[in-house]
Image (cartoon, rainbow, N blue to C red):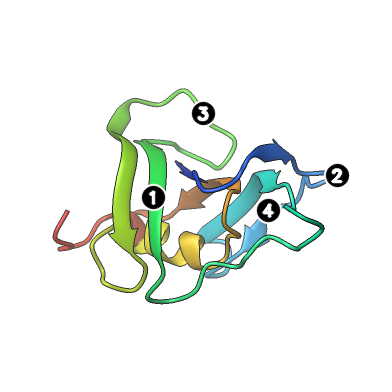
Amino acid sequence: MVEIETVEDENVPAPGNDEWKPLMGEELVMKVIKSARPGNNKDPAPIQPNDAVMIDFVARVADDRFSTDGPTIQEVKDWFIVVGDGDVLPALELAIRFMDSGSTARVWSHSKYAFSSGTR
């Protein structure tokens, strides 16, 4: 499980979102925990390749997508990345691309998306 939070906007709970969204079949899924509050009546901006984003995340070992208390592998606050540069794990990189600025999500991944030869 990887929890990702972009920190550009104020967060509010995602209304009625109890669904896991498949990103790579059942081997990589994401659930929105908080969605961004639209500012000035505008929709939150979707994150695009080459966007520079600030993220917080906690990576844990989890047997299934419902486990939240496994041992922590990595915990990061205020990490600046460029989407698409491959600086982070593939599961994290892909999930960020399906998020809106200011949102928080829970991501569960098979190990083949959770480990890589990335630079960080």
Reply above or below: 10 against 22: above
Residue annotated with mark 2 = 16
The location of residue 64, given as percent across then percent down, is 52, 41
Reply above or below: 43 against 85: above
Residue annotated with mark 4 = 20
Reply above or below: 80 against 86: above
Residue at left offset 50%, top offset 68%: 97
- Amino acid on which disc 4 is placed: Trp
User: In which image quadrant can residue 11 be found?
Assistant: top right
Residue annotated with mark 3 = 68
Label 3 and label 2: CA atoms lie apart by 20 Å
Q: Is residue 50 left or right of residue 37?
A: left
* In this view, the mark in front (2 or 4): 2
Residue at left offset 26%, top offset 69%: 86
Earlier in the chain: of badge 2 and badge 1, it is 2
Label 2 and label 1: CA atoms lie apart by 26 Å
Residue 89 appears in the rendering: no
